[in-house]
Amino acid sequence: MAENGPIEDVAKKISDELFTRFKWRRNGPMDQDFLCEKQEQHKPAKKMQIHTHPTDVVFYYKDPYLNKTIYFNTDLKSYNKSNINRTKIEAGLSSLAKSIACAKRSPDWQEKYIIDNNNYEIRGLLFVYNHDNESTKDFYEFFYPPKPQSGRRASAVKVDRLGIEKNDQIHIIEPKVIDYMITINTDIEHLIASKKFPDDDDDYGFHYPQLTLHKSSEKHLNKPATIELITSPYLIIKHNETITYNKNGDEQKHYDKGFLIYYNREGKEDMEFLYLLDALSNFQIFDGDNKIRIRVTNRNNVPAIKSVFIRALKNYANAWGLAYDEDKDIMKQFNIEINSINTAKKFVCTQEITWD
């Protein structure tokens, strides 16, 4: 059966709130089972009744590069620190592998969740929320355990035994990525409240530059953040001006249009920011005309990160012959700013969930 109960409801609540900001959409019923299309391979040996697979929720978005709709058959997990372990992760991934293999073959699943039968892809998503906010372990150590100073290396998730079919994909959104997403969501809410970011969903979107091998098929502003973008070192949001209207209907502009960049690395060395500046230049963003705000979200960022960035900016400008006045603020000259923001976490009381 698909999971339910107050603990699992925490993951449902968090995921729904988060993905809305990143322009993911939800479709079809939640907490549904569908008939297994590969009974001989997937049905446990001692099980007598017909085998089914769970669907906690299905999220989807239109991928700007692939020009296809991506559907995520999602397994929502909410664990405390002690229950986030290799065994549970492996079991969740193995279950998802079987689920998406059958979802691709299931008329029932597709009738419930597919909006447009043209050009789509079904993937699996394991969403692991840490509801006690105490987990600090690097999630990927479950796949690549570090060698201890003494004793045996911990067992790794056995990826080759998960049963993922060829060309199928399973993504993981783990506690640190969830914290990153919560941080972005919280920061944008604060910017909206201070009129430094538009509050209309149509006035911002995630930026996809035209690359050599990948061209963005969508021309409008309102693009979603793909799973690849969310888990990358940085993501770029393009936004319109922040405008309000007074009681007489007169327009008042509070903030210029530009780019809001969330940077999820530590910023310890100049080279990090030289790479970022070069990417922004190649994307035709770093031109002095666009207002650029870099918001550093990594909890381990260095205290002197602004100094590191200014040094990198000067080195980049000198290397490419970009004119600036040494006696004036170089950040203002290039219309760019950088700030560190606190990592945000969200605590949801499981007792409170049962009253909703």
Image: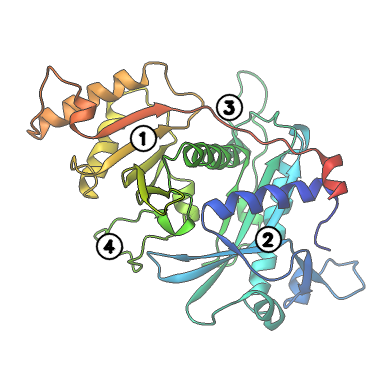
Q: On the image, numbered disc 2 is attached to which residue?
A: 96
How many C-alpha atoms fall within 10 Å of the one at disc 3: few (<14), some, or many (≥20)? few
Residue at 48% across, 50% down = 199
Q: Position of residue 265 (x, y in %)?
A: 42, 32
| 325 or 165, nearer to the observer | 325
* Circle 1 or circle 4, nearest the eye: 1
Q: On the image, numbered disc 4 is attached to which residue?
A: 213
Say which label, 4 or 2, has the lower sequence index: 2
Q: SS class of the residue under badge 1?
A: strand
* Circle 1 or circle 3, nearest the eye: 1
Q: Amino acid at mark 1?
A: Ile
Say which label, 1 or 2, has the lower sequence index: 2
Contact check, label 1 and label 2, Cβ < 8 Å: no
Q: On the image, numbered disc 1 is attached to which residue?
A: 294
Say which label, 1 or 3, has the lower sequence index: 3
Say which label, 4 or 3, has the lower sequence index: 3
Q: Position of residue 128 (x, y in %)?
A: 67, 45
Q: On the image, numbered disc 3 is attached to which residue?
A: 147
